[in-house]
Amino acid sequence: MVMTKILYIFILLSFSHIAISQPCNGQNEGINKCENSRLTCKNGSKNHPKNNCKQLNNSKLYNNTIKVDYEGFSVWLDCQRHGAIKFQYNAQHDTGHFPRANKFSLDSQVPKNCQQMTANAYGHHYDRGHLVPANHLDSSASAIKATNNMTNILPQAANMNRGAWLVTEEITECYRDISELLIIGGVIWGNNPKDDFFVKSHGITTPDAFWKVIVRGSGQDEQAIAWIVPNSNEANRDNLDNYLVTVREIEALTGEKIPVADYIKEIKTSSSWLIPIGCNKG
């Protein structure tokens, strides 16, 4: 187990960007902004086909990343990878029970080159896994619908999506009724071509792992818990505690700055927060 964990951490430290032809690549120095419905590159070039930049009403395009603000949550998309790299939302007291939407969709407000090619199911024992779950936004039918945009979906191993990752969502569901939570998470893409089943069908590689931080309380009562969950069928419910890390480790691995007190960033909890008896996880 120790050896497996060391090997796993070593793999997570290997980052690489896939070589997919994108607007403003190479000598064009990357995307700068949208201008007159066309992408403007950092070197000033505008000689690219018309894009749907004019539809980016609530998005911010910088470098090759788009920040998309939906009702109740935000996602950051890497246009080179055609998928999300980060998500964030506040989980508030459960006051609604709108049903989860069944249909998955591409987002017409986001440039096609910045998202997946289709909303079809993945196959190969991978789910269309939510970064921000619908259940945490069930006070709004429109917010629930937005969580089924493929901008919020990535290939997640079925056991992981319905196992360890689901437990982090259940913890959120229960503790948001105690106090408002800040949820920040993201994707560790890694470099494992053996599970890249969806490049041709969806235009996307398969992430190696997902990370999540839950923050509750403030001041002296502030607490945080963090995980890096491998995108593997071994990541079942019983193994969640094996993926506990410190916030500092996530910051070092991803470059993110998590808004919690410095001393909290060094704390690794001995076990995941217990789900209170009687909690309604629905």
Image (spheres, helix red, strand yellow):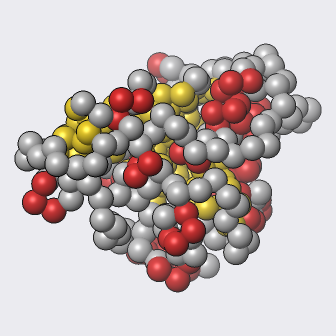
Q: Position of residue 227 (x, y in %)?
A: 56, 52
Q: Residue at x 48, y 28 (%)?
A: 69
Q: Residue at x 57, y 75 (%)?
A: 197
Q: Quadrant of the C terminus?
A: top right
Q: Is residue 87 visible?
A: yes
Task: Classify residue 258 as left or right of residue 72.
Answer: left
Q: In the image shown, does 238 or 221 lie closer to the viewer?
A: 238
Q: Is residue 172 visible?
A: no
Q: Residue at x 30, y 59 (%)?
A: 22
On screen, residue 253 above or below 110: below
Which image quarter: residue 71?
top right
Task: Classify residue 118 as left or right of residue 234.
Answer: left
Task: Classify residue 196 as left or right of residue 232.
Answer: left
On screen, residue 37 above or below 95: below
Q: In the image shown, does 37 or 3 lie closer to the viewer?
A: 37
Q: In the image shown, does 122 or 108 lie closer to the viewer?
A: 108
Q: Position of residue 35 (x, y in %)?
A: 22, 32
The total of numbered circles placed on residues is 0
Q: Quadrant of the N terminus?
A: bottom right
Q: Position of residue 101 (x, y in %)?
A: 78, 37
Q: Residue at x 84, y 36 (%)?
A: 281
Q: Position of residue 268 (x, y in %)?
A: 52, 49
